[in-house]
């Protein structure tokens, strides 16, 4: 599995950047909807902020997984 992960690092870079960008957009939507005191498509501002938090955690876990696979491949 480590070899597969090492081959897919290029795709992982796009995933990490994409998760960060979408997380920023969702956080911005959450802050704007909280300031205006409205909801979009039935989602309250806290839901938008929690979705952004989930994407940020996904981005962090992806980086940690890359570090772990690099250390494992060096052994």
Image (spheres, grey):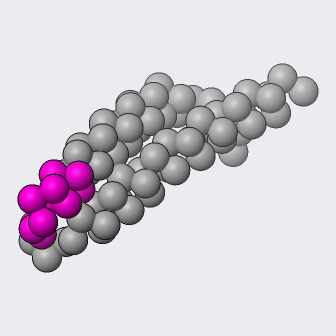
Seen at 73% across and 28% down, the residue is: 70
* Quadrant of image for the N terminus: top right
Q: Is residue 2 left or right of residue 14?
A: right
- In the image, residue 41 lies at what x, y percent? 10, 71
The image shows residue 44, relative to residue 64, as above or below, that is below
User: Could you tell me which quadrant the C terminus lies in?
Assistant: top right
Camera-nearest residue between 73 and 24: 24
At horizontal 13% and vertical 76% (from top left) the residue drawn is: 42
Is residue 37 inside the magenta stretch? yes
Residue visible at 29% across and 49% down?
Answer: 27
Say which quarter of the image contains residue 2: top right
User: Quadrant of residue 21 in the image?
Assistant: top left
- 20 relative to 58, above or below: above
Q: Quadrant of residue 74?
A: top right
Residue 34 position in % (x across, y down) = 19, 60
Is 65 one of the magenta-colored residues?
no
For the record, the magenta segment spans: 30-40
Image coords of residue 37 (percent x, y): 12, 66
Residue 13 placement (x, y as % from top left): 45, 28
Q: Nearer the viewer, residue 74 or 35?
A: 35
What secondary structure prevails in the magenta region?
helix
Q: In the rendered view, would you say 70 is above or below 33? A: above
Q: Residue furthest bottom?
A: 42
Q: Closer to the camera, 45 or 66?
A: 45
Does residue 11 appear in this view?
A: no
Horizontally, residue 23 falls left or right of residue 35, namely right
**Number of marks:** 0
Q: Can you see residue 57?
A: yes
């Amino acid at each position: 599995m480590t070899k597969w992960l090492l081959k897919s690092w290029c795709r992982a870079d796009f995933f990490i950047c994409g998760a960060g960008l979408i997380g920023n957009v969702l956080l911005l939507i959450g802050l704007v909807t909280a300031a205006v005191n409205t909801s979009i498509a039935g989602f309250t501002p806290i839901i938008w902020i929690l979705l952004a938090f989930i994407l940020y955690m996904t981005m962090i876990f992806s980086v940690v997984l890359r570090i772990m696979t690099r250390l494992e491949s060096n052994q």
